[in-house]
Amino acid sequence: MRGARQAAEPLLLGTGLFGVVALAAWDRPVQLLIGGVLVLVIAGTSRRHPFWTLLAGASTALVNLIDLHTFPVWPVVVSLVGCFLAGRRTADGLLAVPAFAGVALAGLVLAAVGPGGLISWINVLLPMAVFGVLPFLAGLYARQRAALREAGWRRAAQLERERRLIVEEARLRERARIAADMHDSLGHDLSLIAMRAGALEIDVGLDDRTRAAAGELRAAAADATDRMREIIGVLGAGPAPTEPAGESIAELVARTRDSGMSVTLDGADAADGLPEMAARAAYRVVREALTNAAKHAPGAPVAVTLTPADDAVTVTVVSGAPRTPPVTASGGRGLIGLRERVRLAGGTLRAGPRDDGFEVVARLPRDVDPAIAEADADPAIAEADADPAVADADTDPAVAEADAQLDPPPQERIQAGHRVRRTLLAVIGVQVGVLVLVSLLVLVLRVAEVTQSRLPAGTYAALRVGASRAEIARSLPSQQVDGRPDVPEPPIPAGARCEYYRVSGDLFSGPIDVYRLCFADGVLVAKDFVPGRSS
């Protein structure tokens, strides 16, 4: 599909541009031929060879030298399209220098040898500056903007991948902690089984068969303990626990209060009877919330509430506004891992701002269906169920903290931004420079045209009718005035050819007065003063 579009693009571009040329220059074969050739070059080179596209687009300004009394429209359209496409599809703005310089030089040569003289060069420079340079810079700017936008999308995709990795890492760590908790609990139970089986093995009141079975049970329990220790060891040792083993929520709150934090507990007995996984999850919710409050809201009061229900227990931890600025940077993984632990326990967790503080709420069921927990572990199902849990993703510190850890914008994006700004400044600077340069050129050409076409009044008075052209040639200016007064002239003598010279040296005056000298057979037959305005 993309290949077909790329193949059809030159055809559509060429057809459209040639249609414009044909409508505007159908009755002017020379312009039609020139326009067709330039359109063919633009359509054939716009994708792979932008230099030739730019050169063809800029060359349309030379058409203005064909007829100095008209200003055709089709060169404007072709130049706009060609120069913009060249800028849009090139990474090197310097290629514009030889292209525009070459066209300007060609225009200078054609103007010098043409009927309009050097002053007609302005008919090339002005259209090329407005309809060539500006569209090229606009295309260059559009390319840089597109590159910056693409870099932004790539950066967003990279951030999303890194955020997912951080979330997945936190989940895996939490699962490792859960496995370690289960190891402690099950290891203790298996040790008790092995100890009781060992006691039965040496009980003299039992028969040999029963004692042998007890010995096998003891050995199996010991082997199971060793295998579980090996499996848990694969997950990594992890940091040593800082809380007492088997600590309850009430003991955790009391220990935290003793450390100086203002914390209250309501409903301490509500967690009694929860399954082991849910009880450990409730403990972790309270511990993580208290830790976050100490880090991010030092000095703020904290309220811990356990609310019992028939099928679940709700754990709520609310912290107030911080009294002093936080002293610890966020780690970005605590709430992510906490959410994973609560999910594996069959519950839900939400966390977000509340008034001026922060609130963490976990709902833990009293009965957990293992099939549901296993289904939740599937990424597709978890993605589908994610909306209620992460509806406040923009305010969830777990996500914000994870994003905060990601690397700063890559150098590629920074450089793209700099290129866009440089291109924008170049657009403004080049336009100002072109306007200044063109203004200076206009002034220089105007001065040259005025000084080289002015006939001093004394010289005019000294000319006598009947003098030969060769005799007075040295007294005449090097070129005639550009244009004639728009007033009735005296009749031209039969068979004579007239020349017109400027009377005044004013650069920008209105209708000018001229001296008319008429020659027949190389002899001056008439000389007249023709005013610029009719009296």
Image (cartoon, rainbow, N blue to C red):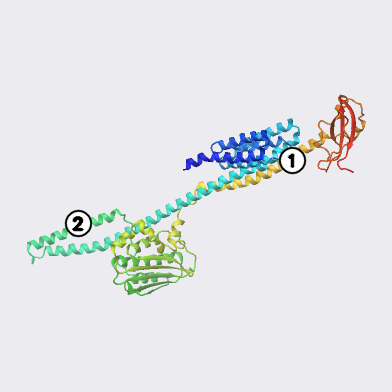
**Which three-letter amino acid code belongs to the residue tagged 1?**
Leu
Crowd tier of the residue under label 1, counting other residues whose Cα lies within 10 Å: few below 14, some 14–19, many 20 or above: few
Mark 1 element type: helix
**Which three-letter amino acid code belongs to the residue tagged 2?**
Asp
Task: In this rendered view, identify the residue nearer to me: 265 or 525.
Answer: 525
Mark 2 element type: helix
Task: Name the residue tied to disc 1.
Answer: 440
Quarter holding the C terminus?
Answer: top right
Res. 249 visible in picture: yes
Res. 55 visible in picture: no
Numbered circle sitting on residue 223: 2
Using residue 494 as the reference point, say whether residue 49 is left or right of it.
left
Asked if residue 365 is positioned above or below residue 429 in the image, the reply reads below
Using residue 362 as the reference point, say whether residue 457 is left or right of it.
right
The answer to which of marks 1 and 2 sits earlier in the sequence is 2
Q: Give the farthest residue toward the front.
A: 27
Total labels drawn: 2
Using residue 119 as the reference point, say whether residue 220 is left or right of it.
left
The residue at 24%/62% (across/down) is 186
Task: In this rendered view, identify the residue nearer to me: 370 or 78.
Answer: 78
**Residue 527: horizontal and vertical position, in percent?**
90, 32
Crowd tier of the residue under label 2, counting other residues whose Cα lies within 10 Å: few below 14, some 14–19, many 20 or above: some
Asked if residue 132 is positioned above or below residue 201 in the image, the reply reads above
**Residue 168: horizontal and vertical position, in percent?**
37, 55
**Residue 239: horizontal and vertical position, in percent?**
34, 58
Give the quadrant of residue 55: top right
The residue at 92%/33% (across/down) is 461
